[in-house]
Amino acid sequence: MPLRHTLLALAVVLIWGVNFVVIDVGLADVPPFVFLALRFALVAVPAVFFVKPPKLPWWKLALLAIFMSFGQFALLYLAMAFGMPAGLASLVLQAQVVFTIVLGAIVLRERPSPRQLLGVGIGVAGLAIVGGTHGQGAPLLPLLLTVAAGLSWGIGNIVSRTAKGASGLSIVVWGALFVPVPALLMALVVDGPSGVADGIAAISLPALASTAYTVVLATLVAYTIWNTLLGLHAPAKVVPFTLLVPFVGILSAWLLLGEEPGAGELLGGAVMIAGLAVATLRVRRRAVRVG
């Protein structure tokens, strides 16, 4: 990718890495599905009145929103509400890298190069190192929910790849319209009407700040960049950047929540960076003149 696109991808990594800590703060006061509905309602309104609809069939936009927005975050929020640590969540969610590469090869026939496969393999090895040390005490259900969230994100990446020519911002804003209603319905099923009302009434200043971050930075800014990059480049070139998200997530959870990383986590983060470099950076060979 061009240097400018690489820097944009790294900005997304930073925003999303810190976002796990921000979500953890918001979920302390607000039930997960209420938090999800609030997030995407504010993403859509008032922006939907100023942003033109994307040049996409409505069914494709709905499919993208269901998997990348509703499915991913409904499962992730539920996992974190059940006790998934923020740092570990940032790690396990990156199972989406494997799902995206595999689905991209099967559905889109975009075969990753041997170098990209090697880079992803190194990155996954780094994830395994971190997971082997950081996730020893993680309950099974939150872990499985987070893996399922990664699968939903991976499917959303593939759908986004087919949305060539559509504005990344318009996809985010108009796609957000498909999230609040099913999120509220899930909230009513899980928490009941009284639980939903109590959750809304209990929204605190930290929860509002968390919502603002997830709406403006993690959604409007980061997903606009992400969808744009996926529309310009093959998934195998874009998705490996998210291997850095756990490194940022674990570091921010350490600094802000006191989740101290061990030596294995630090080693795994270094291996992930190496994998990203192998998967995404091209080595330019200079011609050697003879004589």
Image (cartoon, rainbow, N blue to C red):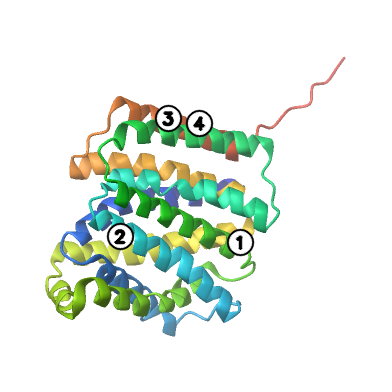
Mark before the other along the chain sequence, 4 or 1: 1
Mark with earlier residue (2, 1): 2
Q: Amino acid at mark 3?
A: Ala
Q: Nearer the viewer, residue 3 or 43?
A: 43
Residue located beneath label 1 in the image? 161
Q: Which residue is found at the position 56% from the left and 70% from the top?
A: 167
Disc 1/disc 3 C-alpha distance (Å):
29 Å
Q: CA distance from mark 2 to mark 1?
A: 25 Å
- In the rendered image, residue 217, in percent from the top left (x then y), is placed at 36, 61
Q: On the picture, is 166 further left or further right than 75?
A: right
Find the distance from the CA under tag 3 to the CA under tag 4.
Answer: 6 Å
The mark nearer the N terminus, 2 or 3, is: 2
Residue under circle 2?
77
Callout in the foreground (2, 4): 2
- The amino acid pointed to by label 2 is Tyr
Give how far apart the Cα atoms at labels 2 and 3 are. 28 Å
